[in-house]
Structures are given as structure tokens and as C-alpha cells.
Image (spheres, grey):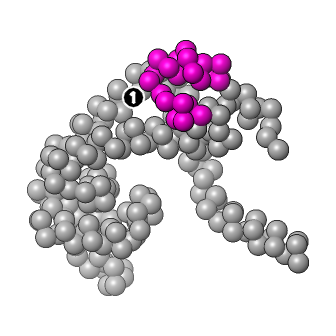
Amino acid sequence: MQSRQGRQDREDFSPGVTGGPVAAAGLDEMTAAKLWGNPCWLTYRLNYLALRYNVPLYNWVERTYGLSRPEYVVIYSLGLKDGALARDIANSSGFPQNTLSRAIQKLVGLGLIERTADDADRRCNVLRLTKEGRALFEESLPRFVDFEHMMLEALDEDERKTLSALMAKLVLASTGWPGRIGREESSQEKANS
């Protein structure tokens, strides 16, 4: 059963689903329904905004540098935290390890990253940007930063701080989420048997 608060959160633009701010934003009826008539409004809105950010930027990366999204994610990750393991990039990006392995192989071949055996675990490779990889990251980063700033122009300074604090709170709470569905299903199965 849906809570009253959940309905209220979804209905903040409901009167204008076919007009008002939604129409002014150029949203079609299906997108509007998913954004404001959806019991999973938060995750859909986050995903929608992420797509509005990621799709044009990664298309630009592919046109400009000839790199796929997984390949650039490796570059971006190492630009933020050089000397990382592939599994750390996989964990932080959501890309499967095998997808990143192919990306890493290509980036090594292009001379954008290098890998060396990890002193702590010889089975793992530490990944680092080369001089060329660092230059690519530094050259491309402003485009990502500028796009995010443009997205945040809709909010005043206090709203940005509030959004940042709320997002941080959700991110910190999220560490326990992945395993919850499995535990709930197994508990439900036991109760039904």
C-alpha cells in the first residue's frame, strides 16, 4: 500500500502532467507519467537525470576521442583516483568486470593507461593513467563539470546545498541495500513453506 506522503511526492506536478511546467519542459506523456505518476518516482527521476547527463557527454567522448563509455569510465575513474584496481572501478561504476577488462585492454593498447602487478596481491593489476591518459582526462573534465553546473542552474545556492546533503545521506544509507532483496525473498519463502 502506498503512503500518503509517497502520493504527495509524486503529485507535486500532477495537475500539469499535460500542461504547465511539464509541457513547458517538452516532456511527452509517457515520460511525464514515469516521472510523476510512478510509485518508484525517486529512482526513475534519478535515472532520468543521469541519462540526460550521461548520454550527450558519452556521445561527445566517443565522437571526440573514439572511446566507448566503459573505456572513458576507466579514464575518469583513474583521473579521480589513480592507482586503482579493476574491481574497484567495477564496484564504483556498475559495469561488469569483463566489460571493463576489454576496456582496460584497449586503453593499454592505446597507451592511455598502464598496469602493473599489485605488490599486495600479484594476481591483481594496479591501473594508472599514462601522461597521455592524464592529458585526455584533464582536457575532457571541464565538459563534464560545465554540464553539471548547467544542470544545477535550476537551483539556488541553498537548494544545491540541500540537494547535496540529501544525496549524501542516501548514498551513505545505500551500502546496505544490495543484499536486502535476497534476504527478504528468502525470509518470505521460509514463511510460505
Where residue 55 sits in the image (x, y, percent)?
34, 44
Residue 187 in magenta? no
Question: Is 51 in front, or is 75?
Answer: 51
Q: Main secondary structure of the magenta part?
A: helix
**Start-end of magenta stretch:** 12-33
Q: How many marks are shown on the rendered structure?
A: 1
Q: Amino acid at mark 1?
A: Met
Question: Which residue of the protein is positioned furthest toward the top in this rendering?
Answer: 20
Image quadrant holding the N terminus, namely: top right
> x, y (%) of residue 41?
62, 39
Q: Residue at x 17, y 47 (%)?
A: 63
Q: Is residue 170 above or below residue 166?
A: below
Q: Is residue 163 visible?
A: no
Q: Residue at x 82, y 68 (%)?
A: 188
On screen, 49 above or below 89?
A: above
Nearest to the observer: residue 73 or residue 64 = 64
Tell me: 78 left or right of 179.
Answer: left
